[in-house]
């Protein structure tokens, strides 16, 4: 695997591959790689000739400095995992390679960035669009692969690509879960053994909503879900929303494409999860 920390060198390398006709697939990550991330790499390998993975813990998308400070950065393990799955190129820049001093611009992508995660993490999606715009501009991939795990992020990036006419095809890959249903996340390493057990209520509740969706009212399902999560020890519910899968506005009984999304503090760790209820 080729490993670059400088964008100019990465671009030079990719230019020669593109000139030879290679289709470039791109998987942006913040590292601490797990099976979920690797599933995106594998998906990219199926559709592209060369797969570039970036590992960059993007400071502008963290609204909590403590969260940024404790974010795991096991770069040697990550490199070994990428080599194992046969990733072609790693881009692992430092902060100064990605941002000039005092860079303040952001993209206005509309109401989506202020809903759900955006409401609970003000500025988060501005940081996400900022870094993904920059990464797309550096890599110029034909296709980019994102996880359904961050469902709202996929919609945000889709909107950005549409607004800016960016020539990249986006793919959303399924959520990889532990055997007991917990959605894989780099943040799971912060969970205590007790947190880990309590966290299972999130996927359990989402699955319940999906199983009972056709025979129940949305308000009732939402209330039951909120009650079940709030009753679980050690959890503080952020939001539970049954939403229109395209807009993330609250769903009604006539909404065709529906997604249920949840965010909660589990002990000291904030987790998110979702399930597509109907599509
Ligand atoms: P992150 O490193 O958390 O920024 O995630 C990088 C990419 O991996 C994003 O597109 C995530 O949605 C995706 N991802 C994270 N966790 C999972 C998972 N459990 N299953 C599938 N994709 C995931």
Image: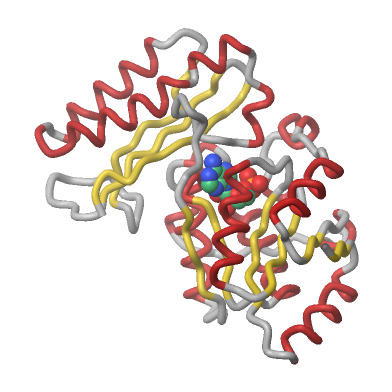
Q: Quadrant of residue 223?
A: top left
The x, y position of residue 219, in whole percent, is 19, 31
Whether residue 199 is visible: yes
- The part of the image, by quadrant, that contains residue 275 is top left
Report x, y in % for residue 127. 66, 54
Residue lying at 88% horizontally and 55% vertically, measured from the top left: 94
Identify the image quadrant of the N terminus. bottom right
Q: Nearer the viewer, residue 69 or 55?
A: 55
Residue 106 rendering spot, x and y as whole percentages: 65, 63
The residue under the point 65% across, 76% down is 49
Say whether residue 59 is visible. Answer: no
Looking at the picture, does residue 29 appear above or below residue 232?
Answer: below
Total numbered labels = 0
User: In this figure, which colouring scheme has been used for the structure?
Assistant: secondary structure
Front residue of this view, candidates 160 and 22: 22
Which residue is at 77% across, 35% downward?
72
Q: Is residue 148 above or below residue 73?
A: below
- Please, which residue is most extreme toward the left here? 215
Write down the quadrant of residue 267 in the picture.
top right
The residue at 68%/83% (across/down) is 22
């Amino acid at each position: 695997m080729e490993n670059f920390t400088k964008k100019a060198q990465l671009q030079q390398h990719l230019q020669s591959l593109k000139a030879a006709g290679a289709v470039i697939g791109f998987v942006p990550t913040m590292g601490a790689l797990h099976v979920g991330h690797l599933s995106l790499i594998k998906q990219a390998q199926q559709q592209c000739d060369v797969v570039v993975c970036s590992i960059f813990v993007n400071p502008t998308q963290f609204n909590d400095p403590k969260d940024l400070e404790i974010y795991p950065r096991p770069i040697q393990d990550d490199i070994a995992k990428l080599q194992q799955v046969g990733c072609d190129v790693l881009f692992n820049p430092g902060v100064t390679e990605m941002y000039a001093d005092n860079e303040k611009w952001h993209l206005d992508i509309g109401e989506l960035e202020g809903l759900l995660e955006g409401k609970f993490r003000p500025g988060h999606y501005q940081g996400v669009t900022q870094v993904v715009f920059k990464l797309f501009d550096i890599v110029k991939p034909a296709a980019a692969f994102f996880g359904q795990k961050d469902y709202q992020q996929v919609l945000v990036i889709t909107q950005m690509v549409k607004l800016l006419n960016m020539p990249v095809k986006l793919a959303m890959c399924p959520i990889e879960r532990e055997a007991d249903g917990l959605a894989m996340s780099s943040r799971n390493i912060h969970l205590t053994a007790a947190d880990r057990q309590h966290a299972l209520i999130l996927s359990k509740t989402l699955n319940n909503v999906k199983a009972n969706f056709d025979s129940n009212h949305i308000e009732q399902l939402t209330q039951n879900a909120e009650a079940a999560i709030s009753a679980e020890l050690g959890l503080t519910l952020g939001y539970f929303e049954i939403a229109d899968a395209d807009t993330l506005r609250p769903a009604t009984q006539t909404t065709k494409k529906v997604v249920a999304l949840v965010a909660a503090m589990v002990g000291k760790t904030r987790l998110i999860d979702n399930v597509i209820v109907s599509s």
